[in-house]
Image (cartoon, rainbow, N blue to C red):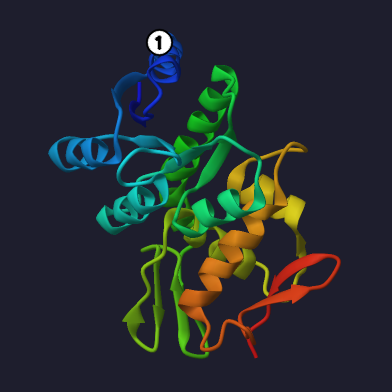
Amino acid sequence: MSQVLLIEDHQTVRDGLQLALTRQGHTVEAVATGELGLERLRAGSSDVVVLDLMLPGMDGFEVCRRIRQLGDLPIIMLTARNDDMDVVAGLEAGADDYVVKPVQARVLEARIRAVLRRSASRRATAERSGLEQYGALSIDRAALVVSKGGTPVGLAPTELRLLLELSHTPGQVLSRQQLLEAVWEHGYLGDSRLVDACVQRLRAKIEDDSSAPVFIQTVRGFGYRFGPL
């Protein structure tokens, strides 16, 4: 049973999702504002956050950024439109996944289970032990620690999973669909914008110049490869 924090200002939507997720076996705490959501996170424990982007007061983008400052808690954002700007902005703020309104409870519940599985499986990468060095970048798969020039790099869970997946086979091109299935556990319904936005965030953290990446290279028309020079 998982602890879900639902941050949604629309009462009908909030009540409906809380009831549906509770019936699926989750324990759901529902609040109407981002400010209240952050208070709940600081006061208690949650396994996953379901976050509406269009909130009164502090909007969902800022709430997402502040949650990321608190740690690596999985975040699924709810967006009213399948709009590129909203989706990309939310992903860049640190969300792990998104669901478009009107929300189907079974779809949201499946996404919650997926992000929780991924969160739990991060530690399973310890079996691929050993410290890997790529120029100034080092990857410790056992400890799940990434450093650059000896300084630890703070990566969100999805960013770390993406880096581990790409660096597991240096030089091999992985398509966006392959990365969706491996990192996000999405099948044919997956959205390649998840991959592109995560690559952009990851490059900003590990590359000297994200506009001229060394570690994560784009293979136009195919996907990405980990190819440090």
Within 10 Å of disc 1 (Cα), the crowding (few <14, some 14-19, many 20+) is: some
Pick the residue in front: 145 or 180: 180
Can residue 212 be seen by looking at this rendering?
yes
* Total count of labels: 1
Picture layout, residue 30 above or below residue 166: above
Quadrant of the rendered image containing residue 162: bottom right
Which amino acid is tagged 1? Answer: Leu
| Residue 144 x %, y % | 40, 63
Residue at figure coordinates x 60%, y 66% from the top left? 199
Quadrant of the rendered image containing residue 74: top left
Picture layout, residue 147 above or below residue 208: above
- Quarter of the N terminus within the rendering: top left
Disc 1 secondary structure class: helix
Residue that mark 1 sits on:
19
**Identity of the residue furthest to the right in this view:** 221
| Residue 69 x %, y % | 28, 58
| Residue 4 x %, y % | 34, 28
Picture layout, residue 2 above or below residue 205: above
Residue at figure coordinates x 49%, y 78% from the top left? 206
Left/right of residue 54 with respect to residue 107 in the rendered view: left
Left/right of residue 49 with respect to residue 71 in the rendered view: right
Pick the residue in front: 58 or 31: 58
Can residue 132 be seen by looking at this rendering?
no
- Quarter of the C terminus within the rendering: bottom right
Pick the residue in front: 198 or 136: 198
Residue at figure coordinates x 47%, y 49% from the top left? 95
| Residue 75 x %, y % | 42, 43
Pick the residue in front: 115 or 193: 193
